[in-house]
Structure formats: structure tokens, C-alpha cells
């Protein structure tokens, strides 16, 4: 899911383009390195295994959880770690336990 900041930048890019001005960095060029799905494939060998959804549906979360396999995980958005909530809101102790994982 795109972050508001990327969406805002893309809207700014569109608005300024409508006035005949071209930004040095387009909305797409801003989003690509700023959000995980845009750069993960290039840095996967040196980045923790990751899975993401483009939906807020529980089924999409379950599919991402299954793709990750077993063990613990930390739930993040594309650009922030939510590190201040790690122990209660974003830490998944066991990916194979759908009940515990869905409490997140």
C-alpha cells in the first residue's frame, strides 16, 4: 500500500506538471527507492526476508504470513519500522499460529 507521503509527492508532481513544470524527481522515481516494494528485489540478498500486501484484507495478510514461513516476524509499513510499538502491536511471535498473528 502506498504511503501518504509518496501519494502526496505524486500529487504534487502531477499538479506542478499541469503548470508546465517538470520536477527533477518524478512521483514514480520518488516512490521506487522510498518504499520497500520498489527496491527490495535489488537488495534482497542483504535485507531480511520480506513479504507485503497491497490490500488491507485479512486474507492478504494470511498469504503474506504463509509466504514468510516459520519463526517470528515484525510487522512494518513500507517506510517506517513502528519501532516504538514493536513489543505489543507489531511483533508476531510465531508465523505459523494464525490466531496469535491475527491479533496484531
Image: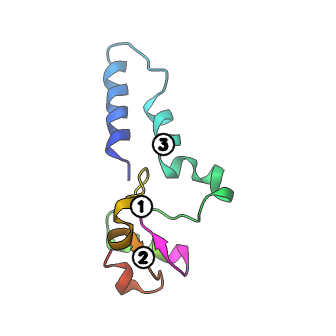
Residues under labels 3 and 2: Cα distance? 25 Å
| Residue drawn 48% across the image and 42% down it | 34
Mark in front: 3 vs 2? 2
Q: Give percent across and percent down for residue 64.
A: 47, 70
Give the label on residue 34, or none: 3
**Earlier residue among tags 3 and 2:** 3
Q: Give percent across and percent down for residue 92.
A: 42, 76
**Earlier residue among tags 3 and 1:** 3
Q: Badge 1: few (under 14), some or many (20 or more) residues near its Cα, within 10 Å?
A: some
Q: Quadrant of residue 12?
A: top left
Residues under labels 3 and 1: Cα distance? 14 Å
54 relative to 29, above or below: below
**Earlier residue among tags 2 and 1:** 1
Q: Badge 2: few (under 14), some or many (20 or more) residues near its Cα, within 10 Å?
A: many
* Circle 2/circle 1 CB separation < 8 Å: no
Q: Is residue 15 left or right of residue 65?
A: left
Q: Tell me where the magenta segment starts and ends, as one range.
A: 66-76
Taking the magenta stretch, the answer to whether it contains residue 72 is yes
Instruction: Identify residue for label 1.
Output: 76
Give the label on residue 101, or none: none
Instruction: Identify residue for label 2.
Output: 92
- Disc 2 is placed on an element classified as strand
80 relative to 4, above or below: below
Taking the magenta stretch, the answer to whether it contains residue 93 is no
Q: Badge 3: few (under 14), some or many (20 or more) residues near its Cα, within 10 Å?
A: some
Residues under labels 2 and 1: Cα distance? 11 Å
65 relative to 32, above or below: below
Amino acid at each position: 500500500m502506498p504511503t501518504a507521503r509518496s501519494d502526496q509527492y505524486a500529487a504534487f508532481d502531477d499538479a506542478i506538471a499541469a503548470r508546465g513544470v517538470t520536477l527533477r524527481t518524478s512521483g514514480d522515481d520518488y516512490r521506487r527507492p522510498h518504499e520497500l516494494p520498489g527496491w527490495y528485489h535489488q537488495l534482497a540478498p542483504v535485507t531480511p526476508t520480506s513479504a507485503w500486501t497491497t490490500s488491507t484484507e485479512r486474507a492478504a495478510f494470511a498469504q503474506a504470513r504463509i509466504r514468510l514461513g516459520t519463526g517470528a516476524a515484525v510487522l512494518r509499513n513500507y517506510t517506517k519500522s513502528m519501532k516504538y510499538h514493536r513489543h505489543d502491536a507489531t511483533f508476531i511471535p510465531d508465523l505459523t499460529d494464525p490466531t496469535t498473528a491475527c491479533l496484531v
